[in-house]
Amino acid sequence: MIVKKPTAKKSVKKVKAESLSLEPTVVVGSHLTVTTWPNGRTELKWDDEALLSEVRNAILKHESNIPATAVKKTRKKN
């Protein structure tokens, strides 16, 4: 007797009513604004000054975490 396994149902992607609008989706970040249009076109707008400021702050934060004194290694006694 041969038993057939049921075939997987094909998934159907439902389109939301929001995606049918003609208005673009805008996502604003700290140094990048992404505008996505309903036809799939994406537009990027960079704020160079904000990006530079974030990079400088990250560098200063990293450099300020450097220990002031070196850690001494202990020697093993034989």
Image (cartoon, rainbow, N blue to C red):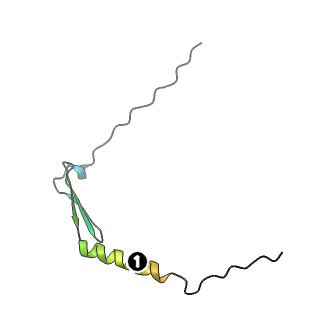
Q: Residue at x 25, y 76 (%)?
A: 49
Q: Residue furthest top?
A: 1
Q: Residues within 10 Å of mark 1 (few under 14, many from 20)?
A: few
- 78 left or right, relative to 53: right
Q: Splitting the image into 4 quarters, where does residue 11 fall? A: top left
Name the residue that disc number 1 marks.
59
**Along the line of sight, which residue is nearer the eye, 52 or 21?**
52
Residue 41 versus residue 11 in the image, above or below: below
Residue 30 at x, y percent in the picture: 30, 72
Residue 56 versus residue 20 in the image, above or below: below
Residue 76 at x, y percent in the picture: 78, 76
Q: Residue furthest right?
A: 78
Q: Residue at x 27, y 48 (%)?
A: 16
Q: Residue at x 31, y 78 (%)?
A: 53
The N terminus: image quadrant: top right
**Along the line of sight, which residue is nearer the eye, 16 or 63?**
63
